[in-house]
Amino acid sequence: MNSSVKLSKRVSCLPGRAARPQRTVSARAGADRPMWLTGSKAPAHLNGSMPGDYGFDPLGLGVDAGKLKWYQEAELMNGRFAMIGAAGILGAEILGVNTTDLTWYEAGTKEYEIPLAPLVAIQAVVMGFLEMKRYQGWKEYGVTGLGNDFPFDPAGLAKKDADTMKLKEVKNGRLAMVSCFGFAAQMAATGVGPVQNLTDHLKNPAANNIIGSVLTIQDHLPDPGFAQVS
C-alpha cells in the first residue's frame, strides 16, 4: 500500500503528468461556464474572469479593455445605488404612510425643515466633488475605489468565499436596477407602489395585471400642466 502511494506521488510530480490534468480541468471549466443564453458563445473579451460575466455584450461595448473595466465599476456603483433605493422604496411602503408620512414617489413634494433647493445645491456640490475625485483616481490609477481598495466587510462574509460574495453583489445589483425601473413604471401606470400592486394582484389577478395597467395608464399619468384655452 505504502509503496503504491509513493509511486503515485512520484508519477504525479513528473512534468508531463502534471500538465495533462490541468488542461483537462480548464477545458471542463470552459465548457461548463454559465451563459446568458444556452448555446451562445461568449465574445473573446469576456473570458469569465469578472464576477457576473455571462458572455453578454451584443454591442461590443467592452472590446476596449480600459472601457470594460470602467463599465464594470459603473455597473457595480449603480447596482449599489439601486439596492439602497429598492430597499428604501419597499421599506417606506411596508412601514406605511402613517409612519413615513409620505409615499416614496412623493418624497420631493414634502416640505422639510431645509428647503429643497438649497438641499439639492449642497448635494450637487458634495457629490460633484466626490465624483471628480473618483474620476481623477480612475485616470491616474485605473481604479475608482469600488473594488478592494476600500474594503468594507464588518461581518466578515467574504472571508470564506470572496468570489461568491462578489457574484452575489453583482447579481443582486442587477436585479435591483431592474426592480427600480419596474417600481417607477408601476407607479406611473397604477398610481400606487409595488407592495400595493402586489396586494391588489393577489386579491384579483384577472383584473389587476400588466394588461390592465397598460390599458389604464392614461388615467394615472400626471397632469402635464399645459394651460387650457377657454
Image (spheres, helix red, strand yellow):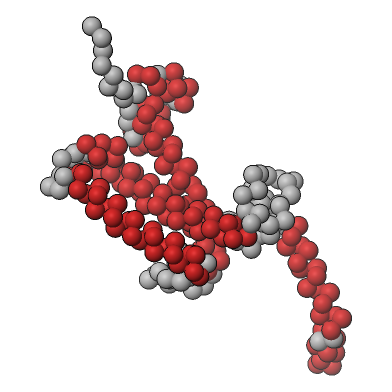
Viewer-nearest residue: 225 or 34: 225
Report the side of 62 relative to 80 (left or right): right
**Residue 124: x, y in percent?**
29, 52
Q: How many marks?
A: 0
**Residue 119: x, y in percent?**
21, 49
Q: Identify the residue at image location x=80%, y=73%.
A: 21
* Residue 103 visible within the image: no
The C terminus is located in which quarter? top left
Q: Identify the residue at image location x=71%, y=52%.
A: 43
Residue found at the far left of this picture = 113
Against 202, is 215 above or below? above
The N terminus is located in which quarter? bottom right
**Residue 188: x, y in percent?**
37, 29
Q: Identify the residue at image location x=36%, y=26%.
A: 190
Residue 24 picture quarter: bottom right
**Residue 134: x, y in percent?**
42, 63
Viewer-nearest residue: 221 or 200: 221
Viewer-nearest residue: 62 or 110: 62
* Residue 214 visible within the image: yes
Against 224, is 24 above or below? below
Against 161, is 89 above or below? above
Residue found at the far top of this picture = 230
Q: Identify the residue at image location x=32%, y=31%.
A: 192
